[in-house]
């Protein structure tokens, strides 16, 4: 069984990572097309991409949208989770389900919905509207992570803080948030990677200033090029960095 | 600072369930009162009402003469020591203890000084920089006590604070609680279901059952002269002998009708009330005494539990002549 198990493991990881490996490998292609054979290794495409103003602007746009929308989703999700953990409303369970429901809706539907809402309100597509769209998809995620992390232990400490004279704002800031720091960090960095990678909503809700995935898509329209692989590799690098950071934060807290 | 407490016709309902049908209780400033009762008797509910975690359905709670209606826990002159300690895991012990002072706007250096003094009081001198997870259960409970006392509450509420500790540690902490209370002079309201703990620390025990006050008084009175059968049974083991106009299955013992209650340690080989002969069914050495089950010869269907002196370990079947003292007849 042993060799078979190892083979299965290798196949599973290859299945997951082969596309990324191919993408990254051909971003170093010394030639015009990112297809086999690999003719040689060069960093030219990275130099070209990083000197492309549109790409660099999109990169910063993406980072800004990801950071701000994740922060907003985190704060709203935290407050909602705290409220649901503390107050028992009639129909609490149904309301909780409703909050996480957007996770099950495709982002195409959410994007189209937001597009018609913004149109109706006369709001033009921009980075702000894309950011709002990202809050819509990330808030349920933040809520779910934070609500799951709140336990009796947390509730007891909050009760003690109130008993000792803390206002609700100070309970949140001095007790709840620090106790949930690992979950908060995890929720934030996951939101960050989702927003960073997100294409459909950003495509529908931006116009002149675009995020990086939208920029990559418009590059793709003019055909395959190792430059696109280079941008993709950069996107992957930053996503992976955020995930690793989240893991490290969580692990350090746990030990 | 210390203040008295008045519970005035307090009723608590949760939906259809009546948890407290109407409690009246007066607690003097500086008194150590223990609310004692089985789980579900309403003692913790009453404590939560005093702390302000819930509002009574009707009735008033006054602390130092001030009506507490509509005042949340944060603004009440009470603090609580919780059974699960509820320490802040991300703060040092000193920051835990100083938390209430910080909420009251006390400056950093004054806070630190006071936190150190409070840690001294509970026997944790110099541990201010440690974190809660480095401590044992008993030490955590000491920190919780120091934290609650640091803000000089008028009334300190203790919600089964020793419930999570092992027996030996619990007994040691009882003595300490008592001496700390004497030192600080704050009114203590302590909830427990352990009658030994209650007797060890209370100035006054308030026995609760099904939301009502069954009995109250100093430990000696509640133990030796219980007002109800429930109190008699809850305070410790008891032998019940039916009594009608002074007659019992054992013959005439004491005047009265109802149930004659005798504690196991009040039955022995000498005493003012002659119980007659009894056959030993089984006996075991319990350290401080010998505990025996006996059946009176005059009423073999009756079972009595008696505590005999350490040196006498009777064999099963042996017949003893028994006497009793401290009789209590309850309806």
Image: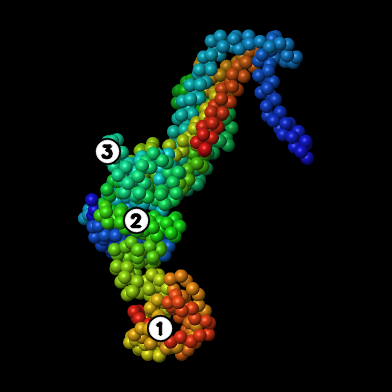
Task: Give the label, 3 or 1, closer to the camera.
Answer: 1
Using the image, determine if residue A244 lies above or below residue B268: above
* Label 1 or label 2, whichever comes before in sequence order: 2
What is the x, y in percent for residue B168? 43, 59
Position of B199 with respect to A227 (left or right) is: left
Secondary element under disc 3, as helix, strand or loop, is helix
Q: Residue at x 44, y 60 (%)?
A: B167
Q: Which residue is mark 3?
A: B110
- Residue B40 picture quarter: bottom left
What is the x, y in percent for residue B234? 40, 70
Q: Are marks 3 and 2 on the same chain?
A: yes
As drawn, the label of residue B269 is 1
Q: Which residue is mark 2?
A: B176
What is the x, y in percent for residue B246? 35, 88
A167 and B59: which is toward the camera = A167
Label 3: how many Cα within 10 Å (few below 14, some 14–19, many 20+) = few
Q: Distance between the Cα atoms at labels 1 and 2?
A: 37 Å
B265 and B85: which is toward the camera = B265
Q: Are marks 1 and 2 on the same chain?
A: yes
- Quadrant of image for the N terminus of chain A: top right
Q: Distance between the Cα atoms at labels 3 and 1?
A: 63 Å
């Amino acid at each position: 069984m042993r060799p078979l198990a190892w083979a299965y493991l290798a196949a599973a990881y290859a299945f997951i990572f082969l596309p990324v490996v191919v993408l990254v490998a051909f971003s170093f292609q010394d030639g015009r097309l990112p297809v086999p054979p690999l003719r040689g290794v060069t960093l030219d495409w990275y130099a070209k991409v990083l000197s492309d103003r549109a790409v660099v602007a999109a990169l910063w746009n993406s980072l800004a949208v990801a950071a701000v929308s994740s922060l907003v989703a985190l704060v709203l999700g935290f407050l909602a989770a705290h409220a649901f953990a503390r107050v028992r409303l009639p129909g609490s369970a149904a309301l909780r389900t409703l909050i996480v429901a957007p996770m099950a809706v495709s982002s195409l539907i959410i994007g189209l919905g937001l597009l018609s809402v913004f149109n109706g309100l006369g709001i033009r597509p921009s980075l702000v509207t894309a950011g709002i769209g990202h809050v819509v998809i990330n808030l349920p995620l933040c809520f779910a992570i934070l609500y799951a992390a709140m336990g009796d232990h947390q509730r007891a400490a909050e009760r003690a803080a109130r008993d000792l004279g803390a206002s609700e704002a100070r309970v949140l800031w001095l007790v709840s948030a620090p106790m949930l720091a690992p979950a908060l960090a995890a929720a934030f960095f996951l939101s960050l990677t989702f927003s960073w990678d997100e294409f459909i909503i950003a495509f529908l809700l931006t116009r002149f200033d675009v995020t990086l995935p939208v920029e990559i898509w418009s590059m793709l329209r003019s055909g395959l090029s190792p430059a696109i692989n280079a941008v993709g590799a950069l996107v992957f690098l930053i996503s992976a960095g955020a995930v690793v950071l989240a893991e490290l934060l969580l692990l350090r807290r746990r030990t | 600072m210390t203040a008295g407490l008045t519970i005035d016709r307090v009723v608590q309902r949760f939906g259809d369930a009546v948890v407290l049908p109407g409690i009246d209780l007066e607690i003097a400033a500086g008194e150590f009162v223990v609310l004692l009762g089985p789980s579900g008797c309403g003692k913790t509910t009453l404590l939560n009402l005093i702390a302000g975690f819930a509002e009574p359905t009707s009735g008033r709670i006054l602390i130092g003469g001030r009506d507490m209606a509509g005042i949340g826990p944060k603004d009440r002159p009470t603090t609580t020591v919780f059974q699960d300690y509820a320490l802040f895991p991300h703060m040092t012990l000193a920051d835990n203890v100083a938390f209430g002072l910080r909420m009251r706007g006390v400056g950093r250096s004054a806070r630190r000084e006071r936190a150190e003094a409070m840690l001294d009081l509970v026997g944790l001198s110099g541990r201010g920089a440690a974190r809660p997870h480095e401590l044992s259960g008993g030490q955590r409970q000491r920190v919780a006590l120091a934290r609650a006392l640091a803000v000089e509450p008028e009334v300190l509420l203790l919600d089964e604070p020793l419930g999570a500790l092992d027996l030996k540690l619990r007994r040691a902490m009882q003595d300490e609680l008592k001496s700390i209370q004497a030192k600080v002079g704050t009114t203590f309201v302590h909830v427990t279901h352990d009658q030994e703990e209650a007797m060890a620390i209370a100035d006054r025990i308030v026995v609760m059952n099904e939301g009502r006050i069954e009995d109250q008084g100093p430990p000696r009175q509640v133990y030796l002269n219980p007002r109800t059968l429930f109190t008699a049974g809850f305070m410790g083991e008891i032998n019940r002998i039916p009594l009608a106009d002074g007659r019992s299955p054992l013959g005439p013992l004491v005047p009265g009708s109802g149930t004659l209650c005798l504690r196991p340690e009040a039955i022995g080989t000498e005493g003012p009330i002659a119980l007659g002969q009894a056959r030993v069914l089984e006996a075991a050495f319990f350290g401080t005494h010998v505990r025996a089950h006996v059946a009176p010869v005059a009423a073999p269907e009756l079972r009595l539990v008696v505590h005999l002196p350490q040196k006498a370990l009777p064999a099963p079947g042996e017949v003893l002549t028994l006497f009793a003292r401290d009789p209590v007849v309850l309806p």
